[in-house]
Every structure is written in C-alpha cells, then in structure tokens.
Image (cartoon, coloured by chain):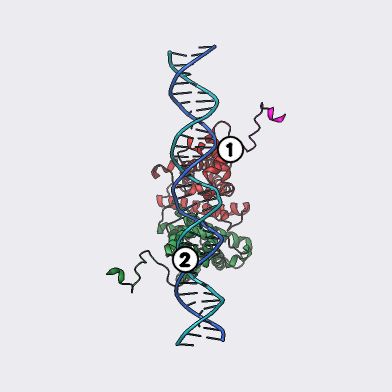
Chain colours: A green, B red, C blue, D cyan
Amino acid sequence: MIENDNSVNIKSAKPRYHHGDLRASLVAAGLDLLKSRTVDDLSLREVARTVGVSATAVYRHFPDKQALLYALCEEGGEQLGRSQIEAARQSGGGKKGFGAAGCVYVRFAHANPALFRLIMSTKPPGSLLDGELTAVGSAMRLLREGVAALLPPDADHVVRRSTAVHAWSLVHGLAMLILDGQVEYDEGMIEQVVAGSVP
Amino acid sequence: MIENDNSVNIKSAKPRYHHGDLRASLVAAGLDLLKSRTVDDLSLREVARTVGVSATAVYRHFPDKQALLYALCEEGGEQLGRSQIEAARQSGGGKKGFGAAGCVYVRFAHANPALFRLIMSTKPPGSLLDGELTAVGSAMRLLREGVAALLPPDADHVVRRSTAVHAWSLVHGLAMLILDGQVEYDEGMIEQVVAGSVP
DNA sequence: TGTACATCAGTGAACGCGCGTTCACTGATGTAC
DNA sequence: TGTACATCAGTGAACGCGCGTTCACTGATGTAC
C-alpha cells in the first residue's frame, strides 16, 4: 500500500532548491535562471516556482521584484570581483595579473550573459556617490589600482583616467560583442585583444 | 455655432505623425520612441497610438511586432552606416577618417541608446551568412576596409582580424559604458580613447 | 455617365496571457508563567 | 509539565494591467462594361 507509507514525503516531485534559507535559495535560483534568460524575461513568479514556493513567499524576504534584482546584481558583482582578484593574484600581479583580470572579465560575461548585463546596467538604490560600494564600483577600484601600479608614478590625473577608461572599454567592448554574437567566443582572440589593454 | 463648422476637421487633437505612408510613419514613430524607452518597453500598441492609428492597423504593414522591430533595426543601421561613411569622407579618409567614423559610432549610441542596443543585438531574420546585408554587417565592412587600408598590405589574415576586433571592441566598449552610465559622456574623452583604436 | 463589383486600409470589440502585488489565512515554533 | 499567547514563514485566491493578436466589419477608391 504505497499511499500509507507516509514516513517519507513523496509529493516533492518538483525540484526544491529550498533547504532552510529561502532568501539564499531565491538568489541562487535567480542567478541560475539568468544563465538561460534575459533579465526582462525573468519573472518573480518563475524564481519562486523554481525554488518550489508560492510567489507571495518572496515578499517575506524582498519588498518587491526590484529588490530581488538588486540582490542578484550584488551577488553577481561580488563573484566577478572575487574571480578577478583571484586571477590577478595567481598570475603574480603586475602586467600579467592585469591582463588575467581582463580575461576573467570577458569569460564571466560569456558565462553569465544576462547577469553581466544586469550588473553593468544597474544603478544602486542608494546614492550614486556610494560608488565604491557597488558591484561595478569594486571592479572599478581594482582597475584603477592596476592602472596606477602600471603607469609611471608621476603620470597625471588625466592620463590615469583615460588609460583606465581605455582599458575598461576594450575589455568591455569585446565582452559585449561576444554576448551579442557579433564576435565569436575564442580564448586566443580574447588573450590577444586583452593584451592590448595593458598600459 | 462652432459645431456646425465642419469644413475643418477638428477632432485630430491627438498628434498625427501619419500623412500618407503609414509604414514609414510607424517606423519614424518607433525610432522616436526608442529615444526615451527601452526596446522591451516599446509596445506595438504605443507605436500605433503615437501615430494616431488603431493597433490593428499595424498588421496591414507588418506581419507581427518582431517585423516592426526588424524594420526599426534596419533603418537605424542604415542611418549609422551613412553617418560613419559621411564622417570618414569629410575627414579626408585615412587614419583621420577611421577615427572620425569611430567617434560617430559612439555619438550615435549616445543619441539613440535603445536603437543602438537593438541594432547590435538583432540577428537578421534570414540566413546569418547574409551578414553583409545586415545593419551591423555594413558597419563591419566599413571597419574591415578601414583596417585593410591602414595596415601594411602584406599583413596576414590573423593580424587583420584581431586588429579589426580590437578597434571595434574599444569603440563599442566606450559606447556601452556611456550608455550604462558607467563613464560620463565627454567629447574630449571620446576622441582621446578612439584615437587609440587607429592601427 | 452610371452602375456593379472588387480591392484594400483602417476600425473597435474581444480573446487569453502572465505578470506584480494585495489580502486574509494557516499552521508550526518559541516564550512566559 | 501544561497552557495561553505571540511571532512569523509560507499559502492560495484574487485584483487590475497592458500586452500581442484575432475577428468580422466599414467605408473609401479604383475598374469594367
């Protein structure tokens, strides 16, 4: 008599990412869904559905959909920043580390297209002056530090700034062209192009 | 007696872009709306509303919404291509012309954010092999010709290609960073950065 | 010139859809005495 | 140990919304004889 065996809860045939911390599960599911969806195609209801929870449960943890998107953006930005720092460290810093961080930037974009776009297009909810605290802000700090370390110490402010924008533009443009399918993903090409971003 | 004066049709208080060629009016209205809207926020109904026509009238000229978007993309791509060619010509071609076309690329993106994104992210309805016929395809041909003209004539295929990707990435990245508000729009900065894209 | 008919651009009502969000609720868990 | 109560995470029905698209239609314009 199968129906009498209630020592095991069978009804969870639908996938359940959720074990304990629903907020974390929602964020994880959101990041996962963004691998195969546009940000605009990601609905609050779908995230909830994926976790195996009612749509309204989300409102226990986020005031609205926008807040959930901010959380995804924040988590994604931290992942990107950590990967870059790690790559730069492993390559021994300097010019090689700077280039390695650039390659990681492009690879991250390729692996997380929608998340990458979300990170780049999201203005933080607080003041824009808190730039340092945002995902993009922390990646930018890394960039500025790298530029500062590679330029001669007497380089003036304008040169520093335009060097940083140059390097960022190059790597960002390659990433975006790959995401939009205008340039084929190719590790060799990435390394070659990114090498041109090192001051 | 105002209501008896029917020699003039008064009821067109709502704006009417539409005079004759509805298809052209729809495209014009769509391009205009894209200056203040995301592509995802542009609805077929709104375009029709703007022109002053019922939503269903659109289906006389386009099989569905996607076809309307393709038309916007095509028109936008042609505008971009023409501007670039014109700028290159006026600058006398060569290195200066190449740089001028790059600046136009960034300025166009800044002036038409959503349209620029649409152009770059749209895969043409036909075969991808028809690349030359697409909006991006024609901009790309200009780019390749420019690179070919500036490189030494014996440069091999790999160098040509990576030079082209390098130049495009740089300009495209700057454009996207400006659109996303990560880099401030600044003519001086544009010229300085774009200069770095000339082989 | 008049009449009958075909063509065709545009109309307005209606459809089903999935969405974000609200609401009153339930049932499990912790706490005070 | 038992009882009364508060807290709180999650539920399911319901809302209004604007959307893309369909449908049968109208009324103006052109064409054949």
Please, which residue is most extreme toward the right here? Answer: B1
The magenta region covers: B1-14
Q: Which mark is residue B112?
A: none
Q: Main secondary structure of the magenta part?
A: loop
Disc 1: which residue: B52
User: Of the residues shown, which amino acid type is indicated by label 2?
Assistant: Leu
Res. A67 image quadrant: bottom right
Q: Position of residue A26 (x, y in %)?
A: 47, 66
Q: Position of residue A1 (x, y in %)?
A: 27, 69
Examine the rendering and report whether any part of residue B61 can be seen. Answer: no
Same chain? Circles 2 and 1: no
Res. B30 image quadrant: top right
Residue visible at 65% across and 37% down? B13
User: Of the residues shown, which amino acid type is indicated by label 1?
Assistant: Gly
For the residue pair A123 and B15, the one nearer the viewer reads as B15
Give above or below for A169 relative to A133: above
For the residue pair B182 and B157, the one nearer the viewer reads as B182
Instruction: Label 2, secondary structure: give it.
Output: helix
Please, which residue is most extreme toward the left here? Answer: A1
